[in-house]
Amino acid sequence: PTRVRQVVMNLVSNAIKFTQEGSVVLACRRSREAPGFLNLMVTDTGAGIPEHRIATIFDAFRQADSDTTRRYGGTGLGLAISHRIVGEMGGSLVVESEVGEGTTFSCHIPHTLHADADD
Ligand code: ADP
């Protein structure tokens, strides 16, 4: 739970940081495609991430651009660590983004909820 909380905090605080107007939504549901997995999604209507930066977004110390660093600070470590933690849990963390439209980080993690619990 501590690790999941850290990942969620990282994704939500980034979403808030890079969203000037609109919304930030955190959704969590059981994965339909992969039974036994939870799907956590953080969607924002913020700045978005340029396509050529997407490939390196989970690398340590990477930030989208130097302007970002000047304006928002940060270390560029949060996503790298989140990606590693989720991977070590046997899950995955992926991103979809469009500049000017917003970003969705989607995290799949194994869970051990009661097998007979309702959806
Ligand atoms: P930090 O936020 O400390 O710089 P992160 O690893 O959490 O480090 O994020 C790395 C970079 O990814 C950020 O500097 C930013 O450029 C980009 N980024 C992360 N989340 C978002 C988001 N929701 N919207 C736009 N850009 C984002």
Image (cartoon, rainbow, N blue to C red):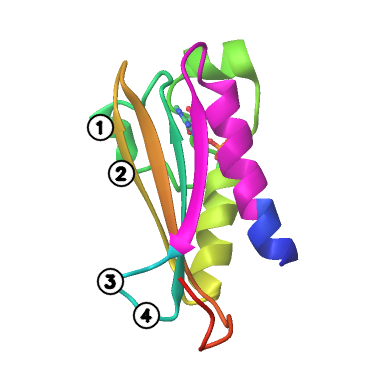
User: Which residue occupies 31% across, 15% down?
Assistant: 100
Q: Is residue 27 magenta?
A: yes
Q: Which residue is mark 1?
A: 52
| Label 1 – label 2 distance at C-alpha | 7 Å
* SS at mark 4 in the image: loop
Foreground disc of the pair 2, 3: 3
Above or below, 88 against 27 in this view is: below
Residue 43 locus on image (x, y percent): 43, 36
- Disc 1 residue type (three-letter): His
Q: Residue at x 75, y 63 (%)?
A: 2
Q: Quadrant of residue 46?
A: top left
Q: Where does the magenta region start and end? A: 7-29
Q: Residue at x 38, y 68 (%)?
A: 31
Residues at marks 4 and 1, CA–CA distance in whole angstroms: 33 Å
Which residue is labeled 4 in the image?
Answer: 35
Check disc 3 and report the residue beneath it.
33
In the rendered view, would you say 78 is above or below 6?
above
The answer to the question of whether label 4 and label 1 lie on touching residues, with beta carbons closer than 8 A, is: no
Work out whether residue 119 or residue 52 is closer to the camera in this orientation and state it: 119
Amino acid at the residue labelled 3 = Glu
Label 2 belongs to which residue? Answer: 55
Marks 3/1: CA–CA distance:
29 Å
Gap in Å between the C-alphas at discs 4 and 2? 28 Å
Is tag 4's residue or tag 2's residue first in the polypeptide sequence?
4
Residue 14 percent across, percent down from the top left: 57, 32
The CA distance from mark 4 to mark 3 is 6 Å
In terms of image quadrants, where is residue 30? bottom left
Are there few (<14), some (14-19), or many (20+) residues within 10 Å of tag 1?
A: few
